[in-house]
Amino acid sequence: MGVVGAGVLVVGATGAIGGLAAGQLTERGIATALAGRDRHRLEKRAAALGGRPRRVFDAYDLNGCARLAPWAAGVLGGLDAVVVAVGVAGFGSVAEVSDASAEHLLTVNALAPMAVVRGSLGVLSPGGVVAVVTGEIVDRPARGMGDYAAAKSALAAWLGVAGREVRREALQVMDVRMPHLDTGFAARAVVGTVPALGPGADPAEAVREHLVVPVLDALDRR
Ligand SMILES: NC(=O)c1ccc[n+]([C@@H]2O[C@H](COP(=O)([O-])OP(=O)(O)OC[C@H]3O[C@@H](n4cnc5c(N)ncnc54)[C@H](OP(=O)(O)O)[C@@H]3O)[C@@H](O)[C@H]2O)c1
């Protein structure tokens, strides 16, 4: 089965990585549906891609997260893949970060993506793909990023188990450990100040290599 016309939901399409993924997938003939928090940016992005269907959601509404994939399957007439690029950064030592900030980081970086994926499992077509952006932080948790690293590591562990559990249904779960990119993500941290991170990789190239090409290849192999 080819990839042209396949239905793909991009969650976090208002962000840098999600926006690039939505653009690159749409360019390749994929029927995308976009979800994001910022209504204005979502409308602009959907319009720029030729008027793609869109839905606003917030990570704190986990039921709303779980309803995204069923919505996309409905508007696209089927769903072949889900891309999740939702997240927020947070900095500070484990002693400094407040419980409220820790809850925010865990909710946006772990619970919300998990709810999106859980909601997709009943509606993805056979051979469907789930690709969720975690990050290299999972392999190299750094000082001053304990709560962010814990959230991403929780998500990565969950995705690993999910992948094994759904293999029998011919679904594929990808944990996309994206390298540090120049998207301004760290500067939008919900808590703390950004440490010196060094230059990041080119976002468009990294999204193509680590996210879009693997998803298209997996869909093509079905
Ligand atoms: N940039 C990097 O260096 C890097 C490296 C590895 C992994 N990652 C991961 O890649 C993902 C995207 O990063 P990015 O660079 O594209 O950053 P970004 O441009 O800041 O995008 C973040 C995305 O998360 C969404 N989001 C944040 N809080 C939300 C909430 N409460 N409810 C719903 N959506 C919310 C944003 O929605 P709105 O814009 O609509 O508010 C946006 O779509 C994150 O999970 C990040 O951890 C990034």
Image (spheres, rainbow, N blue to C red):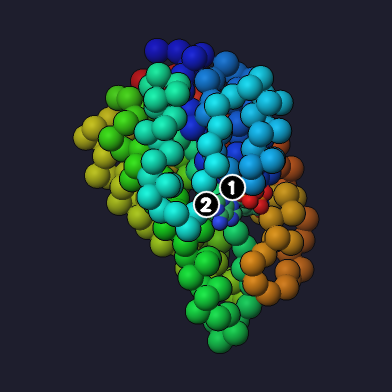
> Does mark 2's beta carbon lie closer than 8 Å to ligand 1?
yes
Label 2, label 1: how far apart the Cα atoms are: 6 Å
Whether residue 129 appears in this view of the structure is no
Secondary structure of residue under mark 1: loop
Q: Name the quarter where the C terminus is drawn.
A: top left
Q: Is residue 138 above or below residue 27?
A: below
Residue beneath label 2, please?
A: 58
Q: Hey, what amino acid is under mark 2?
A: Asp
Q: Is the residue under label 1 in contact with that under label 2 (CB below 8 Å)?
A: yes
Residue 194: x percent and y percent? 73, 69
Q: Nearer the viewer, residue 38 or 111?
A: 38
Whether residue 98 appears in this view of the structure is yes
Q: Which mark is residue 214?
A: none
Q: Is residue 32 above or below residue 196?
A: above
In the displayed structure, does residue 22 sit left or right of residue 117? Answer: right
Instruction: Name the residue: 31% across, 38% down.
Output: 121
Instruction: Classify 10 Å Cα crowding around label 1: few (below 14), some (14-19), many (20 and above).
Output: some
Residue 78: quadrant of the picture: top left
Instruction: Name the residue: 44% across, 54% down.
Output: 61
Residue 214: x percent and y percent? 51, 32
Instruction: Name the residue: 27% across, 45% down.
Output: 164
- Disc nearer the start of the sequence (2/1): 1
Q: Name the quarter where the N terminus is drawn.
A: top left
Q: Hey, what amino acid is under mark 1?
A: Arg
Q: Which mark is residue 37?
A: 1
Residue 64: x percent and y percent? 42, 47
> Does mark 1's beta carbon lie closer than 8 Å to ligand 1?
yes
